[in-house]
Amino acid sequence: METMEWGTGVDGLDHALALELVQVTEAAALAAARWVGHGDEISGKAAAVEAMHNVIGSVPMRGVVVLGEDGKRLVKGDVVGSGAGPACDVAINAGDGALSVARDVPNALAAVAVAERGALYDPPPDVAMEKLVVGPECAGVVELDRPVGENLRAVASAKGGRVSDVVVAVLNRPWHRELVHEIRDAGARVHLIEGGEIAGAMAVARPESPVDVLLGTGGAAEGVIAAAALSCLGGSVQARLRSDGSGTRHDVLHTGDLVRGERILFCATGVTGSEVLRGVQQHAGRTTTQSIVLCSRPETARIVKTQHRSA
């Protein structure tokens, strides 16, 4: 295992737990990667969930799944961990960007977020979430209720550039056609994402990434997990649940509404490549994974590259 670290503070319990959690996301990514390009989304996701389930039971925590998977394993309400260690909320995504895994396109990853008990927002089931995600330098200059063009001009000003330099990540879905037109009419550039919302959201807070903003509507669970990552990276998530047809206008939720508390951990391992992480790579007799491990207290990020002996 090879690590690169940056941030502040000293190692503590959170770091030790985070490095245990990365083994969970590595296991899921390795399992999902075997199905990349085969066009079988269901089998790939099932393999990732099973692998994650097999490893998370040894993690020293008293976790309860708040956001989990469909099916029989790692579902909402499941107790996970060894039964020792801190009591915590757990959010799991065994393969964000399942479409990516089936089609061998970027931005698929496996992710786990952990926070203090009661800290993770629990959205209603089967609800979509509108999101506006920016990095640390733009956290205070945008508002979800403002017009798209106004927000993009504010981002350009905060970054000291032009609107034409701003890159906006948008899920490549039919319901985003009008949003894509708005972004381009404002003069900014669109970066279409086939899968992985979480990777797209994280990219806005990574200095080496070309992505400045993530906009659009996707999963609510993915929004909460992304907010855990952005809490550690200093970025901002603004979100709103989409109306269920009743005419109700939901309030805007901010990062602190989605993930409360001071002790937040986030781990993700790339399945296919993205602006944030390399995907699983096969070599002669070994397989390499790349993961990101984030802690909010002390504020630290690690990139972990691990070589696994191929079975």
Image (tube, rainbow, N blue to C red):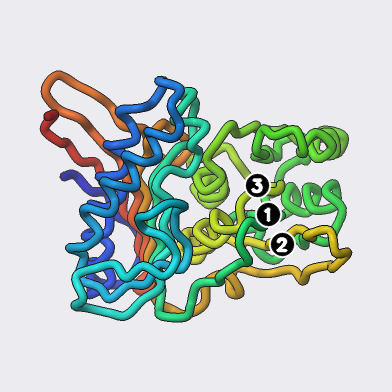
The quadrant of the rendering that contains the C terminus is top left
Q: Position of residue 144 (x, y in %)?
A: 77, 60
| Residue displayed at 48% across by 63% down | 67
* Residue at image mark 3: 214
In depth, the one of 252 and 40 nearer the eye is 40
Write down the quadrant of residue 91 in the picture. Answer: bottom left
Disc with the residue nearer the chain's start (2 vs 1): 1
Dot 1: few (<14), some (14–19), or many (≥20) neighbours within 10 Å?
A: many
Write down the quadrant of residue 88 in the picture. Answer: bottom left
Q: Element at badge 3? A: strand
Question: In the figure, 196 relative to 39: above or below?
Answer: below
Question: In the figure, 262 relative to 93: above or below?
Answer: below
Q: Is residue 30 left or right of residue 206?
A: left
| Residue displayed at 31% across by 72% down | 9
Disc with the residue nearer the chain's start (3 vs 1): 1
Q: Element at badge 2? A: strand
The reply to whether residue 182 is visible in this rendering is yes
Q: Is residue 202 left or right of residue 188?
A: left
Q: Is residue 59 left or right of residue 131?
A: left
Q: Position of residue 201 (x, y in %)?
A: 56, 49
Write down the quadrant of residue 85 in the picture. Answer: bottom left
Q: CA distance from mark 3 to mark 2?
A: 16 Å
* Residue at image mark 2: 241
Label 2 with label 1: CB-CB less than 8 Å = yes
Q: Element at badge 1? A: strand
* Residue at image mark 1: 128
The amino acid beneath tag 3 is Leu
In depth, the one of 224 and 12 nearer the eye is 224
Question: In the figure, 231 relative to 163: above or below?
Answer: below
